[in-house]
Image: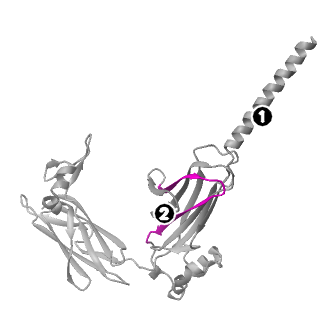
Amino acid sequence: MIRLHSKFWVLNFLFIYSLLFSSNVCSAQNNFDLEVESKASVKTARGGEKFTVTIKAINKGTQNSPDTYISLWMQGYGNLLPSTSSRGACELYQDRVNSEKHAVCRIGDLKGGETVTAEIQIQVNEFGDISQLDPKLTAKLETLSESAKIAISDLQKKLGIDDQTEELYFRGSLGSSRFESVPQNNDFRFTMKTFPSKNQPPCVKIISPKEEEFVITLPGEKVNKVIFTIQAFDPDGTIEKVQVNTQQFQISIEYPENKYVIDGKKYSIKEVEDNKQAFQKYFGGEAVKTGKDTYTFTLENPRYGLNQIFVEVIDNGGRGSVASVNFMVKNQ
């Protein structure tokens, strides 16, 4: 009985010792400690402006962190631009499900005590119209990025632009191909307030035909053309282009590929793309300037029934505005 009891304790001691030893080996192998630091180059930004999010990947442990990577997700009214890392390369992705933009910088092995820095470039989309604000307050927008000491909520109230702000949401993390024993300080989140662009959007209005106007033809006759008159101007620049989208086609929903229906005939997407010049008149074209702030476009042989026309105006700063009109072509 005594021997069996002694053997039992010896076996238990060896089992527990082997567990402790293997645990220590694993701890030694995974003795790396990742930590992330993030900082934006500005506190606030305006539409059209660019800024940088700097992310530092730090290994505070003694062992290598294998296949280390930096991830950044951004959601909101902006875009990720080509970015760099002090080691490795950064790739950009678009998540179509939740509209997040994603940057991944793969930096490889991160040695103990080593730091690698990634710089993610961001550009805020153009938005807002400062002409709608009180002129006495718009001057404050000129130094907005330097106004970090003013609370955002107070700044919004002072500027009177509670309805003309957007937010960018950022979240990021560090990762490795090997499990980290203490995965703390590996994530970050922050939000940035953005304000209207300095560049005001262009103004556009379709003068004729009027909304829901009828274009009447005699029985059996076809309308030769409809002339569009468009007014367009830019309050702080010049008009670069007035594009008219006439949509003189229909879409046939088919498998495996939808087709264009033009003048009663079906065409594949490839057929249309390979013969853009021949099919261009069915899609629209560029309006011609005929006077001060006045442009015209001629639609040849508009189709019968409802026609929905879109006009897009682009200014020299890259901002655009859209107007539309519906009109009917029918027999008398």
**Could you say which disc has been placed on residue 87 in the image?**
none
- Amino acid at the residue labelled 1: Leu
- Amino acid at the residue labelled 2: Thr
Residue 277 placement (x, y as % from top left): 14, 61
Other-residue count near label 2 (Cα within 10 Å), few / some / many at <14 / 14–19 / ≥20: some
Residues in magenta, as a range: 99-126
In reply to whether residue 119 is colored magenta, the answer given is yes
Real-space CA distance between mark 2 and mark 1, rounded to the nearest whole angstrom: 43 Å
Front position in the image: 264 or 207? 264
Q: Is residue 3 left or right of residue 273?
A: right
Residue 196 lies, with reference to residue 92, above or below; the image says: below
Tell me whether the residue at label 2 lies in contact with that at label 1, contact meaning CB atoms closer than 8 angstroms. Answer: no
Q: Residue furthest bottom?
A: 136
Residue 266 placement (x, y as % from top left): 16, 47
| Residue position marked by numbered label 2 in the rendering | 84
| Residue position marked by numbered label 1 in the rendering | 20
Residue 307 lies, with reference to residue 232, above or below; the image says: above
Q: Colour scheme in the image?
A: one colour
